[in-house]
Amino acid sequence: MAMESIRDTDSKGDTEDAAQLIAANGSVPVGDELPAVFNDWFEGKGWSPRPHQMSLLDRSRAGESTLLIAPTGAGKTLAGFLPTLVDLHRRGKLVPGSADAKAGIHTLYISPLKALAVDIKRNLETPIEEMGLNVRLETRTGDTPSHRRQRQKTNPPDILLTTPEQLALLIANKDASHFFGNLRYVIFDELHSLVTSKRGHLLSLGLARLRRLRPKLQAIGLSATVSNPSDLCRWLVPQNKDGIIGAQDEAGLITVEGGAKPEIEILDTKERLPWSGHTARHAVEEVYEIIKANRTCLIFVNTRSQAEFLFQNLWRVNEDNLPIALHHGSLDVGQRRKVEAAMGRNALKAVVATSTLDLGIDWGDVDMVLHMGAPKGASRLAQRIGRSNHRMDEPSRAVLVPANRFEVMECQAALDANYLGHQDTPPLRQGALDVLCQHILGMAVAEPFQEDDLYAEVISATPYSDLDWDTFERCVHFVATGGYALASYERYAKIKRTQDGTWRLTHPRFAQQYRLNSGTIYEAPSLTVRLLRFAKRDRKGLTATRGGRVLGKLEEYFLEQMVSGDTFMFSGQILRFEGIRENEAIVTPAVSNQPMVPMYAGSKFPLTTYLADHIRAMLADPQQWSKFPPQVAEWLRIQQQRSILPRMDQMLVETFPRGDRHYLVVYPFEGRLAHQTFGMLLTKRLERARAKPVGFVATDYCVCIWSLDDMGAMIGDGRLSLDALFDEDMLGDDLEAWMEDSFMLKRTFRHCALIAGLIEKNHPGQEKSGRQVTVSSDLIYDVLREHEPDHVLMQATREDAATGLLDIRRVGDMLARIKGEIVHQNLDRVSPMAVPIMLEIGKEPVPGEANETLLAEAAENIIDEAMHV
Amino acid sequence: MTPQRVLWVSMADSPVSPPFNVRWPKAGRTPQRAESKPPKPDGTSPETAKKTDKEDAFLMALADLQKHHGNIQRTDFGTCIHAVNGVELVADPSGTLYWPTTETLVVADLHLEKGSSFARRGQLLPPHDTMATLRRLRAVVERWQPARVIALGDSFHDPDAAHRLSDEAVATISGLMHQRAWVWITGNHDPEPPQGLGGTSCHEVREGGLILRHEPALKDCLGELAGHLHPKAALLRRGRMVRRACFAASRTRMILPSFGAYTGGLNVFHHAFDGMFDGRDFHALMCGKNQIYRIAAHHLS
């Protein structure tokens, strides 16, 4: 098997066995500062401390907050805990029951995953035991039984390992000032993955509170490589601290270079490289050979359906009965634990996994990572490759398996980025207002607050550092009385300003309400898809057709944006969407054999802006094509002849007829979410221009719209103006209309209303009687939109929608970028670059062989047409 | 069944009489004519395109039904005439009912001050629901100019709600009552008559072959007009489940939709409706934007 190898031999030998959190060899000044028991322990193992571990210890002793950026497996976690362990060792044993022993926790460790906290505890116990340190560590998660939580309050451990949600509950407690009164360190693990979400916003407010309880508190951040470390460095230290002398503006930064550079290859397949699709079916046998040739392989895919597909196909060729397992989020927990355990025992040859394994737990002797399809982001690729091989001095090894031609370019871009050390983590967002509202109530639960003090505290949290006083005050009033223009709820206020000027909780039941509803995690609900047969529409109506077969589950947001009579492919058949009934999506067999709406089988993650730029640059520069396999280079050359390849700053629009339809393909390379929003808006616009659009399809790279009228001719004779078609005002009324139509904004509002505490979460066991118990958030939204469109929750909703499901911001940036840079090519037939998206129309992973043959034939036709020079 | 092409023809088996039997409101009070023309059977009428897409989907769904079954009733005034126990009643798209022979407007389940009722328990919903409800009611009253208004119970969300009304709300109510009779029928949410708002109060009104009460009864219900259940109907066509508040109506009784801004609906096939109608022998008069759509129960989901 031929492989294109990108190998970096500049190995520094900085990888190590992270399962033990231990550093390996190294030319390090042996830590004189380390207490003897630590040195002895290192020596006993034949190890010595790493430079970054010692450096972090030094800085911590100097009272600094520090961010440690290191690749997975560089002994990050031990580094993070070393200052704590040394400090606790110095403190010595406490007399049980003494005031000191009850003085609260010494170090707080926060991890994004429950499982990671548990894992870290297990890994820390070993060195603590072996060194005979007098340190008590405990975890506290949602699974911790209440008697142990109670005991933790009266008799706190030295080190508490917990999650952001638990921290929010701990600080919203009357005992918080005592519990955290002696806190010295707070350690944030996997900080890069925490800070970009609303969860991170709540956590940063929690950190601000911890710092108020304990001004000398030092924060230690542990992170994988990120594009902009100074964002995280600022996140760790207080902002807006005018006049405080000696305070850090940014946390100190220790960066561990990537150890042995990973060896990443792009699979140069001997098979024909597919034009479209995401299954990488062509490469199954080659993947199987790689599995055979290595000890243990981790195989990453982007979606559940890809995982299922690959797993089945691997077993089809698995003549040696190799132990190959499957791991993804919809699997039963017990099943997943079994796989993890088998992996820990090194009993598996390969595991096919989705992003459920992206973070955290290291296990087994993984010596090869395979990545099926494009990684969609350079940082994600680095994270996943980091899963492999924590042995000393051996580089991580990975093979990327692009599933189609565009993905070859994307893999190349990601590989270049990884090679160059570029990262594309998303920029930090301004703190969400719904999260702030939740936090304000929590702080009132803890103790009465002065508005000025709390404001100063809130703006010391990085995401809220730009928050103005007015907005803050509106949030306080929202918490108090709903923040409405009518002052009619004064007497029902949850918090009230008392004579001493502090805001106080008016009733203890609001504390209970807060505890039941806190947190920001919101899982995208999915609906059961049920197939009904509407063969007969007789007098009996739908009663006769109730029941029906359950096909599986699909995300609600996908189902809800479907419009009248849309057809889509799911579970191997073409279905007609009929509607949503309660929590079920009703479908019927479709008459058409061409689904209108793509059931996106590609990636859940949209292509990052960084990779998109890189791909545009590669397309525009023929000299770079030599990097690609010959099949891809030839494809681009023919595109150049038959149509054009746009400059990097241009956007190409192609129009051509095919069959009885006319097609318009736009190539913005902005990622799927943005393209779907863009496609919807563009269709509306073309409708108004009377081009009679019929349907559209969006991929990470382009959008294709087909219509009954000849859009190419309309552009040619000026009936359709491209400048007008792509004008930025697209994001105005059309967007409003569409959002209302697709329920997107209402769902976003519901999410915000839940977080802000306007409506309460449904708790298990709490039955809804149907109509009187709750008021639907849709009705609230309607009333609020009509009477107070500027309400703080409406503001939060709009800000959310801009970056969330609709990715409006990216559409906006794109429209601004392409202004005056649109190149139109009117063609007589499909162009080579349009082939992949043309094949997406009506294409899904189809299990049925007959369907597959039909698709293959259809595909051949299009390709011949496109590539015929 | 033979498909019928014309929208306006009533079905032979329908309990609906042609409009000329109805005493319409006096001149100058003609109900506002619905702006919408009936959609063409193919659903491509340009008028429908102007509406919101939801309404559009609804009309298209109806056009679909029309094509297949031809038995949807539409009248020219956006309203729909339906006879209960032989008494002709006019269902208005607002969700209210006009009783022409007595010049009475019937409205059910206003649930005034539902927002503040939730606020008392710590859920600070926007307090605009009472005025939103009353403004809508005022528009209907101005249109029909009834001699009498009967509120069919649950007019107030809780026994204390009337005391919490804002001054503006009280003024609006007394404006509505000006020079017309007003009856508060008591409901489970408001078992006591409201104090100091005017109007009379009672548990039920029996008049002209009709019984008006809050909760629909299983016995003694010939000619009953009731509320309480907040009926809504769902129509599954053309890729959309369109849900609307509706009148659930047979020849013997009618259950009115709820009118209040924060009142949700309950599907007419929910078990709470069991025993109300003889199987599926009833119609849902679904409230469209400017139009009542009369749809036989067996077409609903």
Image: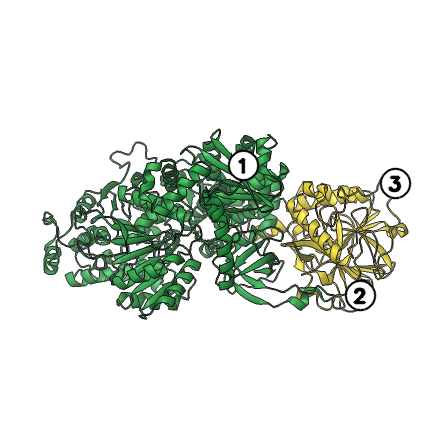
Chain colours: A green, B yellow
How far is mark 3 from mark 1, CA to CA?
47 Å
Q: Position of residue B136 (x, y in %)?
A: 71, 44
Do discs 2 and 1 share a chain?
Answer: no
Label 3: which secondary element = loop
Given the image, on which type of amino acid does mark 2 rest? Cys
Nearest to viewer (mark 3 / mark 1): 1
Residue B104: image x %, image y %? 83, 50
The amino acid pointed to by label 1 is Leu
Q: Chain of mark 2?
A: B
Q: Chain of mark 1?
A: A
Q: CA distance from mark 2 to mark 3?
A: 35 Å
Q: Are marks 2 and 3 in contact (CB under 8 Å)?
A: no
Mark 2 vs mark 1: give the one in front.
1
Q: Is residue A128 above or below residue A628?
A: below
Q: Is residue A819 visible?
A: yes
Q: Quadrant of the N terminus of chain A?
A: bottom left
Q: Which residue position is annotated with label 1?
A: A731
State the separation of the CA atoms marked 2 and 1: 55 Å
Image location of residue A440, percent across then percent down: 44, 45
Camera sees residue A226: no
| Residue A214 falls left or right of residue A521 | left
Residue that badge 3 annotates? B27
Mark 2: secondary structure = loop
Q: Give the answer, above or below, for where A647 lies relative to A527.
A: above
Amino acid type indicated by mark 3? Ala
Image point 9% across, 49% down: which residue? A32
Point 22% across, 62% down: residue: A125
